Image: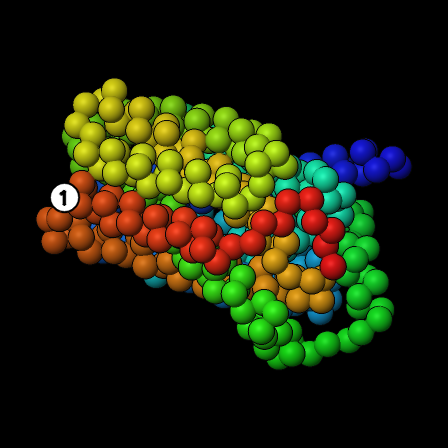
Amino acid sequence: MSQDVSRNKLLWIAGLGWLFDAMDVGMLSFILAALQKEWGLTAEQMGWIGSVNSIGMAVGALVFGLLADRIGRKQVFIITLLLFSIGSGLSAFATTLTVFLILRFFIGMGLGGELPVASTLVSESVPAHERGKVVVLLESFWAGGWLLAALISFFIIPTYGWQMALILGALPALYAIYLRINLPDSQKFIAVKTAERRSVWRNIADVWAKPYAKQTTMLWILWFAVVFSYYGMFLWLPSVMVMKGFSLIKSFEYVLIMTLAQLPGYFSVAWLIERIGRKAVLIIYLVGTALSAYFLGNAESVAMLVTFGALLSFFNLGAWGALYAYTPEQYPTVIRATGAGMAASFGRIGGILGPLLVGYLVAQKVSITMIFAVFCIAIFIGALAVLFLGKETKQQELA
């Protein structure tokens, strides 16, 4: 198999899992709006659904990141997708909020574990000159998943209910597991594992050791800012539309348009990241996200909502692509999955707090303008962390 073919095969197999993960997260925002009507949920209860998902993701990113440096990237890849698929299918049959929340935790564990491990595996398997581009293209499958989520939510939920949407989300993920069984593990990991067997505690300590403390600090601030703002804003987007006076069906249409803007966001970053570098791309797209969030919060007309919603999608998801490319490049192979998993896990704390904060502020009658201003400030802090603490890793060979 040629290097080009194997690279493309790896990208598609990893990307399919990424797509189904995104489909689940994307549908959750629509399911939230449907569940609110069916189960009579309060704003705080809706916030908890998103936050429990993120608690699971925080636990999954940490546990499976550590595990990937012990047993290999491929094994963890399969375990996480299996956990996510089974949890998603079972949640379709939940009849109470408690059962739904428990299953969302396990789905979150699968999601949270898979994403940093997938980007680590792809980073280690692609030549330095195109590593950033390929990891961003892997992230672009997320937009495909959101697009499918919006289509399923628009055509399936109003007619067949949210349960059918969850079943549809779980079934294809089983096919991705089948594909992954034949996937080779990272050769870099195999070489390191053969040479040295390290304890989990040593790996954790090394992530914060002097050579890596600066980039670890930068990554943790960056991940927290990005995840806090993303889940706070995007999980609530259909509900925010309803609060601004649009019907549930209309909110699906608007979010579908905004979701389409994610793809050029990814592709522009994939093109730029090997040309102007990781730091410049991250700062530009984070600042673009912050400004879009501010103007979306102040939007009153349909045209303004759709325009700034689309710009928010473009910049925010572009920043995510750069984040996943940048993170594994901060560490050597022996602690790469641990470092990426710990940063993602800390970031997921932001994913817990974001939806909860929105739920609390909405209940306190705080304006949407003020809520989005909070996210705007958080993203600026993330951009400053990259500017002052980040190092450029463009086309550097991984140790």
Mark 1, other Cα within 10 Å: few <14 / some 14–19 / many ≥20: few
| 189 over 208 or under it: above or below | above
Q: How many marks?
A: 1
Q: Which residue is mark 1?
A: 367
Q: Nearer the viewer, residue 353 or 158?
A: 353
- Give, as a three-letter code, the residue at label 1: Ser
The residue drawn where x is 48% and y is 58% is 389
Q: Nearer the viewer, residue 80 or 158?
A: 80
The colour scheme is: rainbow
For residue 297, say whether it is visible: yes
- Element type at marker 1? loop
The residue drawn where x is 23% and y is 52% is 359
The residue drawn where x is 81% and y is 61% is 190
| 58 over 2 or under it: above or below | below
The residue drawn where x is 69% and y is 44% is 395
Q: Quadrant of the C terminus?
A: bottom right
Residue 35: percent from left, percent from top: 30, 44
Q: Quadrant of the N terminus?
A: top right
280 left or right of 253 in image: right
